[in-house]
């Protein structure tokens, strides 16, 4: 196991001449525009990273993977790699059809020869693969709220890899890495999988792990998709590059992996192992709570912290990669060095900074000591994480028509502008409908499009350090959640439920719309003839009955202050 066969691994690409011809043929085929996650999956399918898969899973392979992590061939494979599509698209496809798979710019990357089409039981997939049908799990949320309802399966013919403009020199296919290892004479190589910046403790533990295994080290961070809220990969790669210098020369290599993680803990660890074997690695570091998704909706861990190591150990022979135990390294003040926690005597002073504490210090611009991280890494993190009161954010008001959203939103906007510092944009329901969504009506589908447009604009404003104030009705929980995710990739999202009752809105009837709705002259009117799903956990709920607007706006300001988003500076 520890002497790898570094011969090339099969890829799914055709040669350049055939690719040219296929590309021309594919122009006439029905085509599917791949999502960001599907694009990551396709790249690893085509370049052999997902060997032995030859395409998106067929239904029988899918069933085997979901039930017992086995393909019909008997090979171990823990993660469903499926092509989810919309019902509309699926209705146009019959097994036997070839479809063109395109990237987000429309470039044809591959052809999928569809052999299978089915509507999966998503609840079963969630329970079996991710351990619970709980939306707090990012992959379960993706499964229910992002992925399409129908899966297409079949073999892939690869035409060209997706193009990456960033960090090209640091991206390697499995065969490129294998060639590199052959050239360098590396035969025992430990992989370190990560989605976080590396600090001194990580550098120490990876270095030790490689030395103990008498192996070289490959820092193999995921740059495809990681857990929502993670540090973006641009920042992380700059951090990894800074840490690379801290290893003895020519022992360690950095390569970026365009994987879309699922945060599936034990199954994910096994999957990561197989992917590393395909990249020519012999060992992999598996730590406590490997690829853990955090807490479930009951506030408990999704997986036992050692379940990933256990499952990996159980399948180690099939994976073909040896697990290297993760030694927790701690800083011992008396000796001013890192040591494995289990070797430190009682009474010694151990220093540590948790992830939460680190984020707090970055947010508040506080000191991050050199024993904890390398100054170059801290500089990079500070560049992308300015203190909270300098970051962009979105305040998202939701409530019935006439509940007072726009009035409070306007008051809030003026108060924030008075404070200065960041640009403020108000995306009011009526204004958005006039300028961005004038062609839309009030069906569920149209409302969702409208809200997602608002979410997109708000996320761009947030990304660029501004304040977006949104004030649509936004009656559906799932759509509000989708907007939250879009925004939270770049900054804070504060959902404010303006909780005026329908009776009170109707009594006020400022625009005379409730009267018309009662008379049936306006159809699908929220609260009267159309649903409004009350937010369960908004950051703030404001009452407007018997309260003046100034007070309501003040409550929002206090909340923003409490969250550190506005301050005295
Ligand atoms: S949604 O559901 O979020 O897309 O709605 P939104 O864009 O915020 O709606 C903006 C205003 O449209 C008026 N209006 C209606 N509201 C609800 N249902 C129906 N059928 C409807 N038809 C027109 C209403 O005045 C909303 O403005 P506000 O500011 O909420 O009173």
Image (spheres, grey):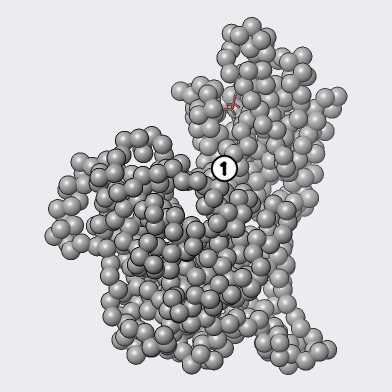
Location of the C terminus by quadrant is: bottom right
Q: Residue furthest top?
A: 519
Which residue matches tag 1? Answer: 482
User: Which residue is painted at 69% across and 52% down in the image?
Assistant: 297
Residue 558 in the image: x percent, y percent? Answer: 80, 44
- 10 Å neighbourhood of mark 1: few (<14), some, or many (≥20)? some
Residue 113 in the image: x percent, y percent? Answer: 26, 50
- Give above or below for 95 relative to 371: above
Location of the N terminus by quadrant is: bottom left
Can residue 538 be seen here? The reply is yes
Front one among 6 and 184: 6
Occupied quadrant, residue 416: top right
Can residue 508 be seen here? The reply is no
Residue 295 in the image: x percent, y percent? Answer: 68, 58
Residue 525 in the image: x percent, y percent? Answer: 61, 18
Occupied quadrant, residue 62: bottom left
User: Which residue is painted at 50% across and 27% down in the image?
Assistant: 446
User: Which residue is painted at 25% across and 44% down in the image?
Assistant: 97
Q: Which secondary structure lies at badge 1?
A: helix
Quadrant assignment for ligand 1: top right
Q: Is residue 316 left or right of residue 15?
A: right
Front one among 402 and 83: 83
């Amino acid at each position: 196991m520890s002497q790898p066969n570094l011969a090339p691994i099969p890829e799914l690409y055709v040669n350049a001449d055939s690719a040219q011809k296929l590309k021309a043929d594919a122009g006439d085929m029905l085509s599917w525009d791949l999502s960001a996650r599907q694009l990551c999956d396709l790249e690893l399918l085509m370049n052999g990273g997902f060997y032995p898969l030859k395409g998106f899973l067929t239904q029988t392979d899918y069933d085997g993977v979901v039930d017992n992590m086995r393909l019909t061939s008997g090979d171990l494979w823990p993660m469903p790699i499926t092509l989810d599509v919309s019902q509309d698209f699926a209705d146009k496809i019959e097994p036997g059809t070839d479809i063109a798979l395109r990237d987000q710019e429309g470039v044809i990357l591959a052809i999928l020869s569809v052999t299978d089409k089915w509507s999966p039981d998503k609840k079963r997939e969630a329970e079996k693969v991710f351990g619970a049908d709980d939306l707090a799990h990012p992959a379960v949320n993706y499964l229910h709220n992002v992925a399409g309802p129908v899966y297409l399966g079949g073999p892939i013919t690869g035409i060209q890899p997706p193009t990456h403009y960033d960090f090209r020199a640091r991206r390697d296919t499995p065969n490129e890495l294998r060639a590199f290892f052959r050239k360098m004479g590396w035969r025992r190589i430990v992989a370190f999988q990560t989605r976080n910046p590396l600090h001194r403790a990580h550098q120490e533990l990876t270095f030790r792990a490689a030395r103990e295994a008498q192996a070289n080290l490959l820092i193999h961070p995921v740059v495809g998709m990681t857990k929502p809220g993670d540090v973006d990969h641009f920042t992380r790669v700059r951090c990894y590059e800074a840490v690379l210098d801290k290893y003895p020369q020519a022992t360690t290599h950095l390569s970026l992996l365009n994987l879309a993680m699922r945060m599936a803990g034990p199954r994910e660890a096994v999957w990561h192992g197989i992917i590393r074997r395909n990249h020519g690695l012999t060992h992999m570091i598996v730590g406590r709570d490997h690829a853990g998704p955090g807490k479930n909706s009951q506030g408990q861990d999704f997986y036992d912290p050692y379940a990933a190591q256990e499952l990996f150990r159980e399948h180690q022979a099939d994976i073909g990669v040896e697990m290297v135990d993760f030694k927790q390294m701690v800083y011992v003040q008396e000796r001013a060095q890192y040591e494995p926690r289990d070797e430190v005597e009682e009474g010694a002073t151990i220093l540590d900074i948790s992830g939460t504490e680190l984020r707090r210090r970055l947010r508040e611009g506080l000191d991050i000591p050199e024993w904890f991280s390398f100054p170059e890494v801290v500089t990079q993190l500070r560049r992308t994480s300015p203190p909270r009161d300098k970051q962009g954010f979105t305040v998202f008001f939701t409530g019935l028509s006439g509940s007072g959203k726009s009035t409070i939103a306007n008051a809030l906007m003026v108060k924030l502008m008075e404070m200065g510092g960041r640009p403020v944009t108000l995306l009011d329901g009526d204004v958005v409908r006039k300028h961005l969504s004038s062609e839309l009506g009030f069906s569920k589908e149209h409302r969702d499009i409208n809200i997602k447009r608002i979410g997109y604009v708000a996320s761009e404003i947030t990304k660029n350090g501004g304040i977006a104030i949104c004030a649509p009705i936004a009656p559906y929980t799932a759509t509000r959640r989708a907007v939250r995710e879009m925004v939270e990739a770049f900054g804070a999202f504060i959902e404010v439920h303006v909780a005026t009752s329908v009776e009170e809105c109707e009594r006020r009837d400022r625009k005379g719309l409730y009267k018309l709705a009662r008379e049936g002259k306006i159809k699908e009117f929220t609260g009267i003839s159309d649903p409004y799903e009350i937010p369960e956990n908004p950051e703030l709920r404001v009452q407007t009955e018997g309260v003046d607007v100034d007070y309501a706006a003040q409550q929002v300001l206090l909340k923003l202050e409490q969250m550190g988003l506005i301050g005295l500076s």
